[in-house]
Amino acid sequence: MASTGIVFDIKKYALHDGPGIRTTVFLKGCPLTCDWCHNPEGIHPHPEIVYTSDRCLGCQSCVSSCPQTALRLTDAGVVRDSARCGRCGTCTTICPAQAREMAGRVMSVDEVMTAVVKDQLFYDESGGGVTFSGGEPLGQPDFLLALLAACADHELHRCVDTSGFAPWSTLAAVAAQTDLFLYDLKHMDRDVHRRATGVDNACILDNLRRLVHLGAAVIVRLPLIPGLNDDAATVDGIGRFLEALRGVDTLHLLPYHAFQRSKYLKLGRPYPGRAIAPKPGRRLPAVADQLRRYGLTVVTGG
């Protein structure tokens, strides 16, 4: 098992990533490119530089220190030549205003666990634990398995938040060391799913069936995206699928929001979900009621 991996965030006191008070560890890299992705800094598997232009002082410390001469100051702020940039991080360490930061760094299992176990008292008192998210944590399977084993050594509750897009052999190995899965569903139609996320959903659906058959504890999470999966026919399709599984009784319904637009800007990438028209809360109660007709306990928000 890998002793190191790439982590882009560790969030303490997380309340929406499983039961109780939790620490969520975000592993970098995801095979999906969802139009509405809330963590775009987790998509690419390598560390990236995030630039917050309104923090920039225009001091040009980063420009003069860049070993690849990939930076230049313009009226719009410091512009990076991505073809020249080696992502060495020199500019992030020298910036006095923290306008340039690294999204993602190599961490060891011991480093992650040092951060995690500091709050074990809160986990024990609240019935919480540790959640591994992303990105897609199954994309770093050896590192994830090593982290799950380390959590077991500390008797911590282990949760994996996943898209389910991975070989079954990977998911089965992870299931043997996981107490709860938060499993994303986006759409039942294969072509629609591919257009919206960049990948086919066949293995995602099949892996969910296999997990349930294995007896794994699973909570399904459905991000409700206006114009994609909030219509009655699509919701019915999801409800029928889950009802037939006879092993999933809880669904978390997640409302769409667009706060991630600013993240794409900082990464220097266009927001792919700009055509999504937000309709905050308008369909949420109706969709929740519709899904409850299939015997599901529906929790909204998060």
Image: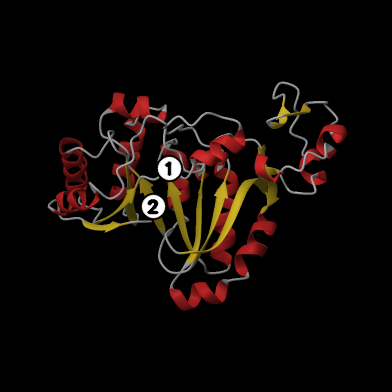
The residue that appears at 55% across and 50% down in the rendered structure is 26
Q: Secondary structure at mark 1?
A: loop
- Residue 82 x/y as whole percent: 69, 25
Q: Quadrant of the C terminus?
A: bottom left
Closer to the camera, 64 or 240? Answer: 64
Instruction: State the residue in front, 61 or 204.
Output: 61
Lower position in the chain sequence, tag 1 or tag 2: 2
Q: Is residue 76 left or right of residue 239?
A: right
Q: Which residue, given by chain and number where applicable, does mark 2 sit on?
A: 182
Residue in the image at 15% along x and 49% along y: 290
Image mark for residue 258: 1
Q: Residue at x 30, y 27 (%)?
A: 192
- Categorize mark 2 by other alpha carbons within 10 Å: few (<14), some (14-19), many (20+): many
In 3D space, how far apart are the residues under numbered discs 1 and 2 (Cα atoms)? 22 Å
* Amino acid, disc 2: Leu
Mark 1: give few (<14), some (14-19) or many (20+) Cα within 10 Å.
some
Q: Quadrant of residue 6?
A: top right
Labels 1, 2: front one: 1
Looking at the picture, how far across and down is residue 222, in whole percent?
31, 46
Relative to 290, does residue 229 appear above or below in the rendering?
above
Q: At label 1, which amino acid type do we have?
A: Ala
